[in-house]
Amino acid sequence: MNRRQFLGLSAGAAALSRAGAQSSNPQAARIGISTWSFHNFFSTTRDDNAPPLAGKPWDARDFPDMIADHYHVHQMEIVAPHISPEASYIRDMKARIERFERSAKRKRELALKAMNEAEIPKLLVADFTASVRQGAATLEVVEETKIPAAYWRPQPPKLDRQGLLAALKSGTAIEGAILEPPRLQLSVRTK
């Protein structure tokens, strides 16, 4: 190992050890890790003179979980050369993102339900604040064909949802639409 490799690995190890302290230090939540910091572990960006890998090359699809599990860092960047342009790879990445979004939505709904049932209006934690609040009334179009022409936008016909919502809020009865009562919402702010 030459001096340059040693310094690079030492700097990476120091950054990761600081990132590992993130759970006890809210300011550590500001730490982010890029896949480029580990470019010699990815086959597409590996230096010609890099030492041989002790295992198989890394896959960008596994990088977020690996970093979160080992170092408790959740802010990261995956650089383009580490993402394969193959259609199956892109489909897999999109599926993972969709699963993550569904999971986040379920967790948010569960947190709202638990806080509401336990009558906890606000939850203050070191790295975020969650509060239950009354949301605004939302529009639900019950039967689109009965909405008057004034609420349709020309070229091609499109429902003017904002105008329809404003009219319902002002008390105008419109066949085909109702004003849904406000629902509870969970508001989360990170620090």
Image: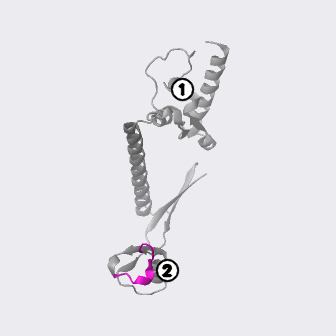
Within 10 Å of disc 1 (Cα), the crowding (few <14, some 14-19, many 20+) is few
Q: Establish if 57 lies above or below 90.
A: above
Residue displayed at 66% across by 20% down: 7
- Confirm whether residue 123 shows in the render: no
Is residue 171 placed above or below 23 in the rendered structure?
Answer: below
Question: In the figure, residue 77 lies in which quadrant?
Answer: top right
Quarter of the image with the N terminus in it:
top right
| The disc label shown at residue 166, or none | 2
Q: Residue 42, position in %: x, y?
A: 50, 26
Query: Which amino acid type is marked by label 1?
Result: Thr
Residue farthest to the top?
Answer: 1
Question: x%, y% of residue 101?
Answer: 42, 50
Identify the mark nearer the N-term, 2 or 1: 1
Q: Which residue is mark 1?
A: 45
Residue 162 visible in the current orientation: yes
Q: Which residues are magenta?
A: 146-157
Helix, strand or loop status at disc 2:
helix
Count the marks: 2
